[in-house]
Image (cartoon, grey):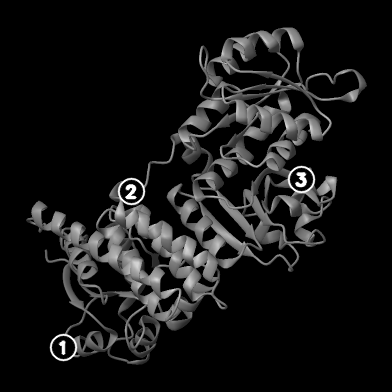
Amino acid sequence: MAGEPILIVDDTPVNLKLTRILLVNEGYRVLTAASAEEALEVLRSYRPRLILADIQLPGMDGLEMTRLIKQDERTRDIAVVALTAFAMKGDEQKAMDAGCDGYITKPIDTRTLGERIRRLLTQRAESETPAVAPPTGHEAIPAAEMQALRRRFLHEGQERARQLLVDLEDAFHANEAARAVHQWVGTGGLLGYTALARLAREVEALLLERPVDMAQVRESLSNLLLAFSTPREALDAPIPDAIVQALRGKCAAIVGLPAHETQRLCVALERAGARAMAFELASPPDSAALAQCDVVVTYVRPGGGDSAWLDPSSAVAGHPTVLVGQREDLAELDPAVQAMAAEFLMDIWQPEEALVRLSLALTHRGRQQARPAPPMAGGGRIRVLVADDDSTVLALVRTALENSGMECHLVADGPKALDAARRWRPQAAILDVNMPGMDGYEVLAAMRAENLPVRVMLLTARQQESDIIRGFTLGADDYVVKPFSPMELVARLNRLILR
């Protein structure tokens, strides 16, 4: 039996071609249009069951096109699904208010697109409709042509991104730049460059903010240029299973984060199978909405410690909480507010770091609290063992800790670290992952096997989520990634010992 007719509306030729092939191979009959005006003309003689439309179109946008379709008696029963690079608070409602029947965020998940459309059509049917028959043959782009498309996409994107960076110094038009970047979101996802599509999505969010943060745009565009220039940088590394297991199906309340940071976090959560609900920092917590959330991510603004979201006596305190902000602002919080936090995200954070900290907030806090705190040294001074084969790092850490009133013992390799932990009995140990003799993981494993009462912080330059998860599996209490701030190291260490 012939499949359902679908109209795809997108102004990017590659997106049109690849999305059409995806749906044809799912058994649908597909027609395409490159603009809203062309789509409305097509509807004069073509009656699709569903229209898959990009919101950001030249001339008339996708939402205005949807309003016209829903106002016309001849076309109002056609299902319209919006395609957008955004997942910000209120965007989905705007699409629904315009008359859209569904909402899909770019980059498109090519594995589930056909099933999502089939499910929507089935839900809309007044009575059960026959299933779409499988296609008799698949349409495919030859491998050589696909490779050519990828090379062209990377080359043109690299040139355009470089030009946008040049334009930042002179004739820069944020709206025009946003249109160029928007195309990369969809095309990058369809060509398999999902990390590049994610970066483009972040840049577009920045370009649509008012006023535009030019410094942040420059940094994000530079990252995007790197992704175009080095294909391996454009490919998303798989998220470790432990993080996915901790976050899949969970809902995070995102409170008060700037729009572009909310966007970055939403994209990261989507990759882990989680979702987000956005809240304003100035608004009191909504108990009904909060009940749907598993973890709370709260932004700490300068002098913003009086928000109801940071009240230890509120319902928020019953949820694992991650506080986000500059170190100075987090340090100024009342100790009772600081104690609410299961984790911190400090200063400039990366999406991968956010996923790790959120997963730890959900899973690690209980294990950490279950481990008995090591006894304090005489006089109440905290004794810290620091193990690193880099003399510069040792000197930096020693200065920071001693200025904070802690007592340090420095060693340069793994065997000496384990021997010092046995004899000196520190309250905390900072272990570099890469050390001669025994690496940090081996020292950590030996400490836990001997039940030494010491909190362990890993110091690593790898910034690989799988390495971090390995450390926590072996019994680490926290970690800091090189290059690190001494202030952050001290803050995390104080919290670790005094918790």
Q: Looking at the image, which is closer to me, 214 or 96?
A: 214
Viewer-nearest residue: 42 or 19: 19
Q: Nearer the viewer, mark 1 or mark 3?
A: 3
Nearer the observer: mark 2 or 1; the answer is 2
Residue corresponding to mark 3: 340
N-terminal-most mark, 1 or 3: 1
Name the element at disc 1.
loop
Q: Earlier in the sequence, mark 2 or mark 1?
A: 1
The residue that mark 2 highlights is 235
Q: Please indicate whether residue 473 sits to the left or right of residue 373 in the image.
A: left
Label 3 crowd bin: few (<14), some (14–19), many (20+), radius 10 Å: many
Q: Indicate the quadrant containing the C terminus: top left, top right, bottom left or bottom right.
A: top right
- 228 sits left or right of 426 in the view: left
For the residues bearing labels 2 and 1, Cβ distance under 8 angstroms: no
Residue 340, percent from left and from top: 76, 45
SS under mark 2: loop
Q: Which residue is mark 1?
A: 45
* 3D distance between C-alphas at marks 2 and 1: 42 Å
Q: Position of residue 149 (x, y in %)?
A: 17, 60
Task: Find residue 86 and report its horizontal and vertical position in percent.
Answer: 45, 68
Q: Quadrant of residue 457?
A: top right
Disc 3 marks a residue whose amino acid type is Met
Q: Measured along the vertical axis of the image, is residue 46 above or below residue 184?
A: below
Residue 414 visible (yes or no): yes
Position of 254 relative to 88 (above/below): above
User: What residue lies at 37% left-to-right and 91% top-to-bottom?
Assistant: 71
Q: Quadrant of the N terminus?
A: bottom left
In the image, 135: left or right of 364?
left
